[in-house]
Each structure stands twice: as C-alpha cells, then as structure tokens.
Amino acid sequence: MTTKRYSEEFKQSMISLKHSGRSATSLSKEYNVSVSTICKWIQQDDPSNTNVLAASVIDPSKIKQLETKIIHSDMGSQYTSELFEETFNQLNLKHSYSRKGCPGDNARIESFHSILKREYINCQCFQSLEEAILGIDTYIRWYNKDRISLAA
C-alpha cells in the first residue's frame, strides 16, 4: 500500500478552501483527497481545537454529583494543556497521568478510543465543536447500549 504525499502548499490551500466555507466532501471529490485526510490537515493546522474539546467535556455538575476527586488520563497534549489543567484547578480535581510510553496503563480506554476513531470519528468531518460533541455523545450512547460486543 502506498501513501500519497501532498505538498505543504497543497495542504494549506485545502485548509483555506475549507475555512472559506467549502465542504470537505466537495473538496475530496474535486481534488481526489479523502475527507478524513482533509479533516486531519484542518486539525493539525489548529491543534487548540483538541484542547478546547478535551476541556469542554468536563461536566462540573457530574463531577460534583459523583464526588470525583481525581481523573486519570494519558500524557496527550490535550490533557497536559494549560486549558485542561486550569479546568481541573477550578474544579479542585487532581490529575493522574499514565507513565510516558506505557499505553498498557490505559489498555481498556485505548482500545475504546481505537474503536471510536475507526468506527465513527474517521468517517466524519465535523463543522463545529458542538456538532462533534453531539455526534460523539450519540455514538458512545449507542456503543454502550446497543452495539453487539463479544467482550464480557
């Protein structure tokens, strides 16, 4: 399997066209580039999108209701970002991290994230943060309730 290489200039022109209102689907058809590739370029162009998304899913009322004191994550940039840490500080939460380079510390969630990306996220090109949150929330609810699983 060969991977196509695109110039930085081409990537930037796709990002500009997408930001100007063109859909990733139309760009994909016109320039023969996969929708997921275009979305990946857009995400790489502004990594703060990931930081905002990571921090936005922390629900203060749920934290209080569950009496959560500590949350565990890996060392991903979105979880070590200043925005994420500020959010934790405001909620008086402690942040526990996996050891660097040890994804086995989070084997179950790493497996779920792989499935989430493969079955849902890589097939989407969200137009807004709200659309991403709603779509992922719907997928997770379906995954937990209706998806056939062979695991016990």
Image (tube, rainbow, N blue to C red):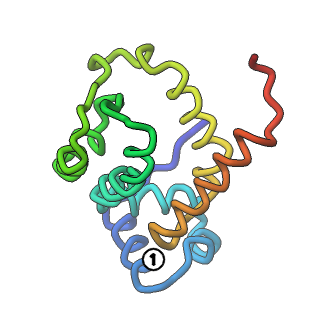
Which residue is at 37% across, 50% downward? 54
Report whether 137 appears left or right of 98.
right
Which residue is at 61% across, 77% downward? 26
Report whether 86 appears left or right of 41.
left
Residue 133 lies, with reference to residue 115, above or below; the image says: below
- The residue under label 1 is which amino acid type? Lys
Residue 139 lies, with reference to residue 70, above or below; the image says: below
Report whether 13 appears left or right of 140.
left
Outermost bottom residue: 20
Quarter of the picture containing the C terminus is top right
Query: 59 or 105: nearer the eye?
Result: 59
Q: Residue 114's quadrant in the figure?
A: top right
Query: 136 or 5: nearer the eye?
Result: 136
Q: Residue 113's quadrant in the figure?
A: top right
Q: Secondary structure at mark 1?
A: helix
Residue 56 lies, with reference to residue 63, above or below; the image says: below
- How crowded pointer 1 is (Cα within 10 Å; few <14, some 14-19, many 20+) is rated as some
Q: Which residue was labeled with disc 1?
A: 18
**Could you tell me how many numbered marks the image carries?**
1
Image coordinates for residue 107, horizontal then vertical, percent: 50, 19
